[in-house]
Image (spheres, grey):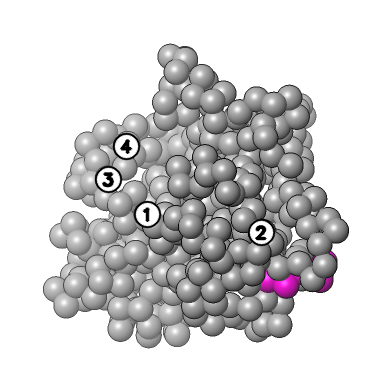
Amino acid sequence: MKVAVCGLWHLGCVTAACLSNAGNQVVGLDVEEDVVAALKLAKPPLEEPGLSDLIAGELLAGRLSFTNDPAFALRDAEVLWVAFDTPVNERDEADVNFVRARLEAIRDHIRPGTLVLISSQVPVGFTRSLRIDWAGKNLKYAYSPENLRLGRAIEAFRRPERVIIGLDNAADRPRLAELFMAFCTRIEWMSLESAEMTKHALNAFLAVSVTFINELARLCEAVGADAKEVERGLKSEGRIGPKAYLAPGAAFAGGTLARDVRFLVRFGEQHGIDTPLLGGILASNDQHKSWTCDKVQQLLDGISDPVVAVLGLTYKPGTNTLRRSAAVELCGWLHQKGVKIQAHDPAIRELPAELNGNLSLKLVAADALRDADVAVIATEWPHYRAMRAEEFVSAMRRAVVIDQNWFLAEALASDPRIRYIATGKGAGV
């Protein structure tokens, strides 16, 4: 099938490469000339394991190309796959006008009969409004929410548990089934609005789960219970199950989950419907964001010239992006408090200008631990799984480790030489 993928940031690059690898003829389209120029050299704008090699292979095979020219990209396209990464501001509000403006810029180049498939993060009603506004174009419309997993994006695209597809017209099922069946045989067909709402609902449910277990974890700390044991008890209940998104740890950092919660709260406001549960999610999550800072402050009380080791700086493992990184926010707070920061991250070899002077970036994790009073496991890189208790004990001035997500619990939690602190651990500070 001939597919044009519009928008070539993280979502669009993964979509284009995976579609091409499945045997489709794919053209990636973006207005950013430098992005397109780099992609022609198999250099995606964001680090994602395996993506550069996948793009390189598809370019070589001749199934994938990139362009700034909408006329070229859309002249033969059977499907226009809209894959913009919708911008989100610091209040987690999505700039939907960005997506609409980019679409309006190419509308005159879309051939009649083209199926417009939207996967960008948009509110309920967006696809329908596009169909109404473009009624004279004789186009077909569908919505399939993105399933992007930072650091595991290729695997998530190729092997989803199921695919959600919202249709404007049931007659378009065969074309969409042909496109998606290469990746997943389970397709949940529904209306445009239901598919859009499913994306909001899924992320909101995950956000509820995160805030619920973290509120419970703080209570566990206060009363001496172990939140990981409580987690095990919850997941052994058949009505909850072992895959439930219940693991005491860090607050969600914003962006995807927070964006959809805000969408739903706004819908309630627009339609006069109270949403107290949804409205409380972000307040609870924001409160939990101070957990690591609170622990560090207590642990450093009375220590002269304190040193903190921060292991991991990126937003998530498997990527090199620092935007919305809780680790970077922690470093900013520590710097304001006058704490010396020694950091390490396997994906970061040079600090951006705004972090220069705030911290010392070490090339190996052991150097970051040297003479530190507290170590914070901030990003869960597999690299750190290989570290053993002895490395912390021998390098640090005081072997105190804050591991909010219990990432190194197996290696560190039971070692009597280490003071190990994790979310919901009853013996914490």
Mark 4 residue type = Glu
Q: Measure how far apart labels 4 and 1 are at the Cα level.
A: 14 Å
Which secondary structure lies at badge 3?
loop
Q: Earlier in the sequence, mark 3 or mark 2?
A: 3
Q: Residues within 10 Å of mark 1 (few under 14, many from 20)?
A: some
Q: Quadrant of residue 343?
A: bottom right
Q: Measure how far apart labels 3 and 2 are at the Cα level.
A: 45 Å
**244 vs 257: above or below:** above
Mark 2 residue type = Arg
Which secondary structure lies at badge 4?
loop
Mark 1 residue type = Arg
- 121 or 301, nearer to the observer: 301
Q: Measure how far apart labels 3 and 1 are at the Cα level.
A: 11 Å
Whether residue 281 is visible? no
Determine which residue is flagged by label 2. 398
Residue ranking furthest to the right: 302
Circle nearer the viewer, 2 or 1: 2
Determine which residue is flagged by label 4. 161
Q: Earlier in the sequence, mark 4 or mark 1?
A: 1
**276 vs 41: above or below:** above
**Mark 2–mark 4 contact, CB under 8 Å?**
no
Q: Earlier in the sequence, mark 2 or mark 4?
A: 4
Is the C terminus in the top left, top right, bottom left or bottom right quadrant?
top right
Whether residue 1 is visible? yes
Q: Would residue 102 be found to the left or right of residue 163 on screen?
A: right
Which residue is located at x 69 percent, y 39 percent? 428
Chain part drawn in magenta: 337-341
Which residue is located at x 34 percent, y 32 percent? 188
Determine which residue is flagged by label 3. 159
- 275 or 359, nearer to the observer: 359
Q: Where is residue 249 drawn, in percent x and y?
A: 59, 42
Determine which residue is flagged by label 1. 152
